[in-house]
Structure formats: structure tokens, C-alpha cells
Amino acid sequence: MSFNGISGAINEPGQIPWEIVLIYFVLALFFVFYYGKKNGGLKVFSTLDLVYIGIGAAFSVAWEFFIGSYIGKFLPHTPFISVGFWGRLVIVFIVAALVRKVGAGMLTLLIFNLLSDVFYYGFGGEPMFTIYESLTYGLFVDLMIAATGGKIFGIGFVPKNGGSSVQRINLISTILAVFEGGILGLLWAIPDPIFYSGFFGPFIYGYAPNWAHILFDLGAFIPGDLVFGIIAGLLALRIVKAVGQ
């Protein structure tokens, strides 16, 4: 018996226990909202924020499933290269930098997933795919926004002593953009092999995960996601400065 194409399998051999996944989501959501409120990253979205989020989500769909997919036809078919996914990563990081409020990541990925269902996938398996996208990729972005107090990628960095030169502040902001972008890039390499192949895929379709394949994919995804995470952090910093924020 299934609902909307979801078998609801929770005891497949090798599948991550659902209790672990649930505990992760509960603790991660608690952390992101608690520290967002404590550090200043939890604020009400403005109309402009929602415009950035909506445009970013729509462009992510256009890039990943159409533009990136077309470009990918001319590249080797390998898990080490994912033009569509890297494009989404860059776009979402830029949106997060423009908004810099807790919830920007999850809302962007939620809209991204809904638009993906409308234009590409269909709605079979929902709401599990929305939960997966929003509470992994999106939540990771919001965790960084919360941890940095809304100053993700070094944007708005101000030294505590107030005595640093503009050049030094710019250098520190660049270093933070590289560091935080790299961390987020590494985190974005995790959901597809671990969360999806290790739990959500088996839960929806009822199959036993192949952990050799999962670990191979994880190792294959990390280098590219790390590099493009750094690139995205630097681009986001430059774009935010260009728009005068």
C-alpha cells in the first residue's frame, strides 16, 4: 500500500533509521531558529527579499533542468561533473547573500522543488521531495546564516575593535567568503548520496540502499561542490557589494 507513489519503507537493509533522520531535522531546525534569533539572523522577509527568493528559485529550475542539462550533453557523463547542480548551488548562495535572513534557504528550495514538480518531475512522491530539498540543502544554507548572525560570506563584517583599514576588512570578508562557501559546498555534497540514497529514496521506492555506490557518489560530489561553493561565496560577496547592500 502506498500514498502518492510513496511506499513508506523504513526497514530496508542498510537504510538509515528514520529515527536518526527525524532527530537530525528536529535538532537542526531548533539550532537554526534559536541561533538565528540569538545572533540576529532571524528577521521578517521584506518584499524585496521575497522577490530575490522567487527569482532565484525560478532561475535555479531553468538552469538545472534546461540550460545546465543542455550544456551537460557536451560534457563527459560522470558523477564528478554536474553543471546543472553547480548552477543551482551558485544561484541559491547568491540569493542567501542578498537576503541574509534565516528561512531564505529553505524557502528558496521549497519554491524550487514546487516549480520542479510543475515543469519537470510531476507531483508523484510529494511531499517527501519537498521535505528533502528544503530540510537538507535549504536548511544547510540557513544554518550558515544563523551561525554568522546574518553576515554570511563575510558580508557586513565589522571588526570588534573598529580599527581595521578598509583593505583589511575587505581581505577578511574575502577569506570568510572562501571559508564559508567551501563549508557550504561540502555540506551540499551530502544530501543526495546520504540523505536521498540512504533514506528518502528507499523510503519512497522501497529498495535497499547500496552503500558502496553511496560512498562513491559522496567522494565524487565533494571536489566539484567544494570548488563551486568557494566560487559562489566569492560571487555572492561581489554581487552584494555591486548592488550596494
Image (cartoon, helix red, strand yellow):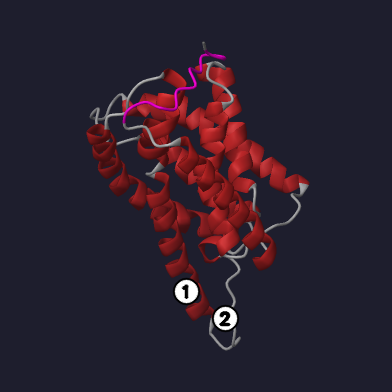
Q: Main secondary structure of the magenta part?
A: loop
Residue at coordinates 55% horizontally, 55% vertically from top-left? 143
| Element under disc 1 | helix
Q: Position of residue 196 (x, y in %)?
A: 41, 33
Q: Position of residue 95 (x, y in %)?
A: 58, 47
Q: Is residue 243 rendered to the left or right of residue 138?
A: right
Q: Is residue 25 rendered to the left or right of residue 107?
A: left
Q: Is residue 8 magenta?
A: yes
The magenta segment: 2-13
Q: Is residue 138 above or below residue 243?
A: above
Residue 179 occupies quadrant: bottom left
Q: Badge 1 is on which residue? A: 172
Residue at coordinates 54% horizontally, 27% vertically from top-left? 128
Q: Position of residue 132 (x, y in %)?
A: 51, 34
Q: Which image quarter is the C terminus in?
A: bottom right
Of 4 and 161, the residue lying toward us? 4
**Label 1: how many Cα within 10 Å (few below 14, some 14–19, many 20+):** some
Please, what is the three-letter code of the amino acid marked with disc 2? Pro
Of 182 and 142, the residue lying toward us? 142
Q: Is residue 121 visible?
A: yes
Please, what is the three-letter code of the amino acid marked with disc 1? Ile
Q: Is residue 12 rendered to the left or right of residue 99?
A: left
Q: Badge 2 is on which residue? A: 159
Q: Is residue 92 visible?
A: no
| Element under disc 2 | loop
Callout 1 touching callout 2 (CB < 8 Å): yes
